[in-house]
Image: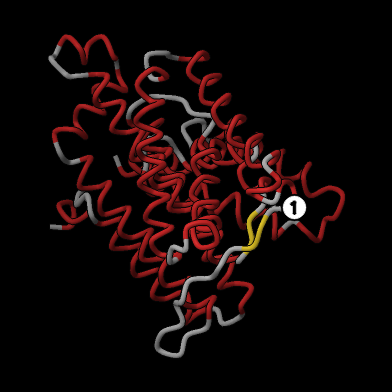
Amino acid sequence: MMTKLLKNPYLPAIVVAVIVLLIPLVVGSNFHIRMATMVFIFSVVVLGLNLLMGYAGQVSLGHAGFFILGAYSVALGPPLLGLNPWFSMLGGIVLTSILAFIIGRPILRLSGYHLAMATLAFGAIVYIFVTNEVDVTGGPDGMPVKRANLAVLGLTHLMSWYWLTGAFLVLAMFLLANLLESPTGRALRALHDSEVAAGVLGIDVARVKLIAFVISAALAALAGASLALLDGHITPVAGGILRSVELLTMTVVGGLGSLVGSIVGAAFLVLLPQMLTSFHDYEHAILGLLLVTIMVVLPRGIVPSLNALVRRWLA
């Protein structure tokens, strides 16, 4: 019975839902609630990126481009088109998904370093555009974002977004768990092992890679829009090249091919810098040293490596 429960693909999502419910009971300060909300937001991005990298085996260094497109959609929708922020968010996710579909068809024909460079170029183009179009995006200084009306049940703006982003995270985990248990999910696993072998088995390799790419882009846009609406302001820095590297690091550190690893990786990179602020000038050096140590000691990422160690210990 216990073994069957542990193998339930929806168990991680259920556990995360329980954690989301318990956090406000354990911590009460706005700072901790905001940190938890930031973890939820970045976990959503990393879940999508892990689907693309950990399951489909495709490298992306440009996901910050999709992230910033989602953010600027909610910033530009109300003043330019008179849209409600919620419709702006939905529109941004849809448009980002369409863009991912359009550019994904040619880009995903590449592989390895060539694919990484192509996605990096896409992210750089988006970053340069939002930085230089001062009249539209506000340039390097960014622009204000009209906050969505979310204060329900007497909750503050921050607490409202805590619950909403927590719901986004749990929903994304349920949807991805369902996807991975479907024929498409099995095709993704086969694709990760070998594209040639997957093609020989009759899998439409191009279609499966494109599905993973579009879903990951949509989740990145959702997270970007959530961050912009939470902060009420957005700048191009939120979608710079360093953000793409940060997202990639979260994915690898947490563990490729692990939904739980996506959350652990996001939490590690969001929370650890805050914990190291007391070291002042040495915090970046310590963070870098910890990342190197983790990759050496736990080469498959935190969650898969620890899972393998526990299985070996129990065997």
| 55, above or below 274, in the image | above
Residue at image position (81%, 61%) is: 278
Say if 155 sits above or below 238 in the image.
Answer: below
**Residue at 19% of width from left, 52% of height from top?**
8
Residue 207: x %, y % from top left:
24, 24
For the C terminus, the image quarter is top left
Is residue 206 or residue 40 the one in the foreground?
Answer: 206
Q: Residue at x 53, y 32 (%)?
A: 62
**Where residue 284 sits in the image (x, y, percent)?**
77, 45
Numbered-mark total: 1
Front in this rendered view, residue 291 or 98: 98
Towards the viewer: 45 or 186: 45
Q: Mark 1 sits on what residue?
A: 141
Q: Residues within 10 Å of mark 1 (few under 14, many from 20)?
A: some
Q: Judge whether 193 appears above or below 68 on screen.
A: above
Could you tell me which quadrant the N terminus lies in?
Answer: bottom left
Residue 117, relative to residue 33: is it above or below?
above
| Percent x, y of residue 211 | 28, 32
The residue shown at (51%, 25%) is 119
Residue 301, horizontal then vertical, whole percent: 48, 37
Instruction: Note whether residue 220 is visible.
Output: yes
Question: Outermost residue toward the right?
Answer: 281
Q: Is residue 309 visible?
A: no
What kind of residue is marked 1? Asp
